[in-house]
Amino acid sequence: MTATAAGYARLAMAITAIRAGITFAALLTATLAIPAARRFVKRRGWCLITRHRLRRVCWETRMHTRAGRLPLILWIRSTKVGERAWVCAGPGSASRTPGHHEQLL
């Protein structure tokens, strides 16, 4: 959203605001009309939502260090059945047993 707003502002400076609005409307229409672009935007959105949900789960289950550092979410990729996430829980993460938080994630 921030990048879109910044792009709109730069484009509005270069050309009139009406033309900038028409340009962004055309880009949005093209993105929604082309199936591959639509799938990419949808999958990317779900990856961002998954990243946020993983961070909230780690915080609410108190899976963090004593300093309050959460595990690193290194990579999230869309698959045919959902998303795949690589999470790096560093040393000092609060865990009762090695597999305790696996059921919650």
Image (cartoon, helix red, strand yellow):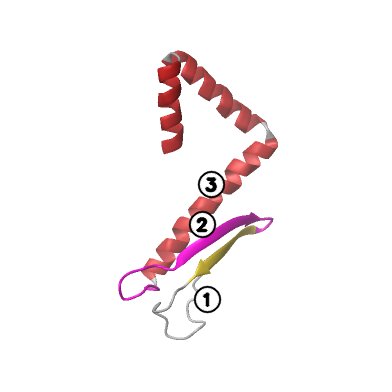
Magenta highlight on residue 65: yes
Query: Is disc 1 surrounded by few (<14), some (14 to 19) or many (20+) residues within 10 Å?
Result: few
Q: In this orientation, does residue 88 appear?
A: yes
103 left or right of 38 in image: left
Magenta highlight on residue 76: yes
Q: Which residue is mark 1?
A: 102
Return the residue nearer the eye: 25 or 71.
Answer: 71
Magenta segment range? Answer: 62-81
SS assignment at label 3 = helix
**Disc 3 versus disc 2: distance between alpha carbons?**
9 Å
Q: Amino acid at mark 1?
A: Glu
Q: Which residue is mark 2?
A: 50
- Tell me which label, 1 or 3, sits earlier in the chain: 3
Return the residue nearer the eye: 88 or 47.
Answer: 88
Tell me which corner region of the image, top left, top right, bottom left or bottom right, holds residue 65: bottom left
Query: Is disc 2 surrounded by few (<14), some (14 to 19) or many (20+) residues within 10 Å?
Result: some
- In contact (CB < 8 Å): disc 3 and disc 2: no
Residue drawn where x is 59% and y is 44% of the image: 42
Residue 35: percent from left, percent from top = 69, 36
Residue drawn where x is 41% and y is 31% of the image: 6
- Tell me which label, 3 or 2, sits earlier in the chain: 3
- In contact (CB < 8 Å): disc 2 and disc 1: no
Identify the disc placed on residue 89: none
- Tell me which label, 2 or 1, sits earlier in the chain: 2
Q: Which residue is mark 3?
A: 45
Query: Is disc 3 surrounded by few (<14), some (14 to 19) or many (20+) residues within 10 Å?
Result: few
In the rendered image, the vertical position of residue 28 relative to residue 21, given as above or below: below
